[in-house]
Amino acid sequence: MNRSIAPPSYPIGKIDYPAHHQFIASGGVPVYLVHDEHCAVLKLELVFNGGARFQDQPFQAQSTASMIPEGTTRFTASQIAEKLDYYGSYLQKRAGDDDSSFVLYCLPKFLEPCLNMIQEVLLNAVVPDNELDIFKKNSIQRQKISESRNGYLTRRAFNELVYGKQSIYGQTVYQQDIENISRETVMAFYESQYKTGIKYLLVSGFVNDKVQQQLDQFCSGFKHSISKLNPILSQQSTERYRHIQNENAVQSTIRIGKLIPGRKHSDYRKLQVMSLILGGYFGSRLMSSIREEQGLTYGIHSAVESNLEAGAFYIETDMNNELAANGIEAIFAEIQKLIETPVEADELNTAKNYYLGSFLRSLDGPFSIADRAKIIIDFGFESNYYEEFLEIINRVSALDIQQLAQTYLDRKDLITVVTGKK
Amino acid sequence: MLFTKHTLQNGLTVIHHPDFNTKLCVLNILYRVGSKDESPDKTGFAHLFEHLMFGGSKHVPDFDTVLQTAGGDNNAFTSNDITNYYLTLPFNNIETGLWLESDRMFSLNINQKSLDVQRNVVIEEFKERYLNQPYGDTWLKLLPLAYLEHPYSWPTIGREISHIEEARLEDVKTFFDSFYAPNNAILVIAGHIEEAPALELVTKWFGDIPARKVNRPQYKTEPVQSEPRHLEIKAPVPLDMVLKAWHMPGRMETGYYETDLLSDMLGSGKSSRLYQVLVKEKGLFSEIDCYITGDVEPGLFIIEGKLSKGIPIESGDKAIQELLQKILSELNEEELQKVKNKTETTLLFNDVNVLNRAMKLAYCEMLGDINLVDKETSHYLAVKLDDLIKNGQKLLTENNCSTLYYRSA
């Protein structure tokens, strides 16, 4: 076999985003479906207007999501856990900034008893004092462990600086916030954001007619929750550098970045390509230069993230304390190159192909497709959002990347947070 | 699960698994080499070597760029038992993946520069994951306590940084020759491709790689532990921790499934015994976990708990021991059914994406029974309560246990 000749490789010509379907359940709750007949299991995400943006005090949204399944008028927390475990299911509770959700993973044959239990906790939660005490105590201990980690401290400071402390996206939890939670605050949030109804259901995997009927039946007990969204104002701080001392650290965590417009802005998808070229994959500039050539770190990456109303660009890495100062300069040198010199055609082509390939990977299996669908639902995009994707990515030019870098990566706008031992 | 299995003349095992719901093709190559195949004074080699596999081969100076240009992505991991490489590509570019993987199996370019850089990267990884995290060195300390003879006594990252610092080009080349042979590998090609073209392409790219002699060391048998072992660490961590490790059967030995289910009964989920009693009722621990290492050779059954503030480690340890005896006498059919249901869910969820299925096929083949991909669930469902209890009583004694106290300094 002559291995000196590479086999042909082809561009990704077309992306088939397998559309999700929708029906409105009897009580008015929208249900979105990603059905896959080959899948033996199902994932059910119940989305609520229970994100931190609706809360009156820090940690209220998170503690409510956690406490709802911890006891009802009929069942104790242990009985609820026992039942859900017995049916082999997993129930995750998540409270983000913009919304909150309960995610149930289960086998179709056990869907009904699981739904019954979820209905019970959503309608009849009582938040027992002793359960809340245990939850608070353990949350504080977990918080202490988080606060001993470089990565956590860095991200917390970074978010406060980039989004601003007045923005919900910039706020994080402190031990005192956990202390301040009372049964009344949890019950109040539960009453106003959960008992009033469900925002929508997103179900993926084995969703045949029978499953759909069961979901319709389940939803008939709930109203469709529509909450007014007060705009979130994010404002980056004028502070550009912060060092957080950690006496026990061998390495320093470094995060560099800034506030950017979120996913709704037309620059967002192009910024994803720019970030990819800089530090978004193994062949990226930062990985090649900082890890592979200079061996300064085990890993370095850049990414863009988007909440509903604002986003951030960041680069993150860990390196030895004494290397951190040089490392930061090496990172800025790579950023400067992106600003000064247009990307070569080959490199741009590799990045685009990689990007489209990773999009295909993100469609592997119904659960991943559902995660994609959630973006369309939450941001109110058209159903052809992902088909447009290919076109936009193919159009991005070297000049676009350079202009984006000039607009968004100017050193005087970038915030640097370092946690480590000086 | 649909699959077929073939062996090329050079000894390479080839497994094909079709799935036309995805537009991807997966190539998973498992080499039968892990950290257990290292010599005790040169640990961390299998994992260091995994890094070197990305340093270019004879006809491909840059593995990643070629793959990424074809829209692909890849990664790898090293365990005690295996080194596993996987890549995914849009289906029409799978041949690029075969070219890349075959070239590095055929003639990896191992040079001083690549070794120097990857050595640094691995040393940074060592620091980042094992030294610079609270409790990060737990396994570095626990394994040599639990294993006196068997090569599981060091973690895959290596026993100490100096072993990686001292790795020479010659050692690394010997390692490649000893293990990276087609007759020591299992290749799975899966996803959007029919069997005939899959086989044709694999034979085209891998068929001419010569078989090599594999030099596998004889693993030392771990002597049966006959008395309790203890070790204390003091470090600036937020909470005290106790970790207990019992020797358990290997992956294909009698008692493995019983032990795995027992670990779920004790520690998986909020309704598990340890959580209910030690975290919720008595408040001795803020979190507690029970799991097995799941290694091919006899592994470890672990209980790991972080103590609530003000509770001495000794009391927590004692409470665990007392509770274990009590639980073993009380376990019932309903609890067993519960963990069986949980296991069934977990196994089915793992099969949802094609990459996981490809890895599972390779792993089961490595274990010696590829049909486990389908049979495993029934093995778990067939476990009897009596056997599970007897097995647990035999296993969970202090004489079979290594206990680590991690004190907050």
Image (cartoon, rainbow, N blue to C red):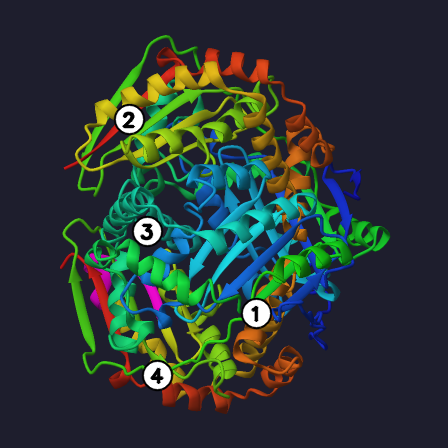
The residue carrying mark 1 is: A374
**Closer mark to the observer between disc 4 and disc 3:** 4
Above or below B109: residue B150: above
Residue at x 39%, y 50% (from the top left corner): A126
- Name the amino acid, label 2: Leu
Chain at numbered mark 4: A
Q: Give the range drawn in magenta.
A: A315-325
Chain at numbered mark 3: B
**Closer mark to the observer between disc 1 and disc 3:** 1
Chain at numbered mark 1: A
Q: Are marks 1 and 3 in contact (CB under 8 Å)?
A: no
Q: Which mark is residue B124?
A: 3
On the picture, is B232 further left or further right than B301?
left
Q: Earlier in the sequence, mark 2 or mark 3?
A: 3
In percent of width and height, residue A368 lies at 61, 61
Q: In which quarter of the image is the N terminus of chain B?
A: top right
In percent of width and height, residue B71 lies at 63, 68
Q: Residue A409 carries which label?
A: 4
- Name the amino acid, label 1: Lys
Q: Residue A192 carries which label?
A: none
